[in-house]
């Protein structure tokens, strides 16, 4: 089970109404390498991963849900005062026609989220390599998003998220080594 | 939110977020280094600090979880305080 805490993992401040930037940020909400994909990927893989790695997948998967909430907060704050005309100019006219000002799990180009973004092979090393790649792709996406804004408050929150991807990738690499040691131990028997 | 939150709210929340950060960082580290006794001791130390700061914060600004409400009162406080995207 999960217990909800009424606070973000890291503060999210935005300096101005910026629906154009919100549109780009949707990539990390419902995109292929976004936070929803990350959370669903890890939390699903943990049922069949060897016991030693279950805690890591559970804890990183849970942190991804906290990141999803941070991204949602950014998008919400960047668009909450926007007029339909401003949304249209920012390329969110199609979004507004379907969803109003509500959030939706889609990527920056408006393609809806799909489970085909993620994989679960049931082969522990293969799954962990996918996870490492996912973290690296998310890190790169955060860098592109940081490059797309001049809002210093937003850059700060995005930099935090970019750094978390680096830590997660390191932990997953360690998990691969733990599994390799474990598999070698088994061969000795 | 109609009432703006006082600067004290943001300062104390940020202190709590900093302590949470240390704890979540240590948690992931310990998941792959479960025998590092120094890190376990650090976790214990920061957990105590976090719990103390959390209690102070909740007494002033309301519960952070539905379980941490001051149940002596008759009001259901959980729905009152602002949500993270409203802060």
Image (tube, coloured by chain):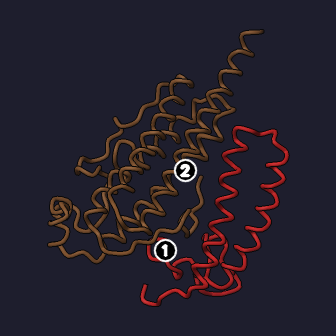
Chain colours: A brown, B red
- In the drawing, does residue A89 fall left or right of residue A55? left
Q: Nearer the viewer, mark 1 or mark 2?
A: 2
| Chain letter behind tag 1 | B
Q: Counting other residues with Cα less than 10 Å from the Cα at mark 1, is it few (<14), some (14-19), or many (20 or more)?
A: some
When the figure is inspected, residue B80 is found, relative to residue B20, above or below; the finding is: below
The x and y percentages for residue B26 are 71, 51
User: Residue beneath label 2, please?
Assistant: A164
Q: Residue at x 50, y 35 (%)?
A: A131
Q: Residue at x 20, y 76 (%)?
A: A83
| Front position in the image: A125 or A163 | A163
- Residue hosting label 1: B83
Count of residue discs: 2
The quarter of the displayed image where residue A154 is located: bottom left
* Residue located farthest toward the bottom when viewing the structure as drawn: B3
The one nearer the camera, A17 or A93, is: A17
| Quadrant of the frame with the C terminus of chain A | top right
A42 lies above or below B49:
above
B16 shown above or below B28? below
| Quadrant in which residue A170 is drawn | top right
Determine whether label 1 and label 2 are within 8 Å by CB. Answer: no
Name the spot of residue B84 as percent of width and height, x first.
49, 71
Left or right relative to A136: residue A103: left
SS state under label 1: loop
Is the residue A92 above or below the residue A86 in the image? above
The chain carrying label 2 is A
The image shows residue B55 at horizontal and vertical percentages of: 72, 76
In front of the other: A110 or B68? A110
Query: Which disc is residue A93 wearing?
Result: none
Q: Residue at x 65, y 77 (%)?
A: B69
Q: Residue at x 51, y 28 (%)?
A: A129
């Amino acid at each position: 089970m999960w217990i909800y805490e009424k606070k973000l993992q890291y503060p999210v401040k935005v300096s101005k109404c910026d629906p154009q930037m919100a549109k780009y940020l949707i990539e990390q909400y419902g995109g292929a390498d976004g936070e929803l994909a990350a959370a669903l990927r890890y939390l699903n893989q943990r049922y069949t991963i060897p016991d030693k790695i279950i805690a890591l997948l559970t804890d990183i998967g849970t942190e991804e849900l906290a990141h999803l909430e941070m991204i949602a907060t950014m998008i919400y704050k960047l668009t909450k005062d926007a007029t339909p005309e401003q949304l249209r100019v920012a390329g969110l006219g199609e979004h507004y026609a379907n969803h109003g000002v509500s959030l939706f799990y889609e990527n920056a180009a408006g393609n809806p989220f799909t489970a085909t973004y993620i994989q679960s092979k049931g082969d522990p090393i293969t799954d962990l390599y996918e996870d490492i790649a996912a973290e690296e792709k998310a890190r790169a996406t955060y860098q592109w998003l940081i490059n797309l804004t001049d809002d210093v408050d937003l850059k700060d929150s995005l930099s935090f998220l970019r750094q978390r991807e680096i830590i997660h990738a390191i932990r997953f690499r360690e998990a691969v080594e733990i599994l390799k040691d474990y598999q070698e131990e088994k061969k000795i028997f | 939110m109609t009432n703006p939150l006082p600067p004290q709210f943001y300062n104390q929340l940020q202190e709590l977020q900093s302590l949470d950060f240390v704890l979540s960082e240590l948690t992931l580290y310990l998941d792959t280094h479960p025998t590092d006794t120094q890190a376990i001791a650090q976790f214990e130390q920061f957990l105590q600090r976090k719990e103390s700061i959390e209690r102070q914060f909740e007494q002033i600004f309301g519960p952070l979880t539905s379980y941490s409400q001051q149940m002596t009162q008759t009001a259901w406080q959980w729905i009152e305080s602002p949500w993270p995207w409203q802060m």
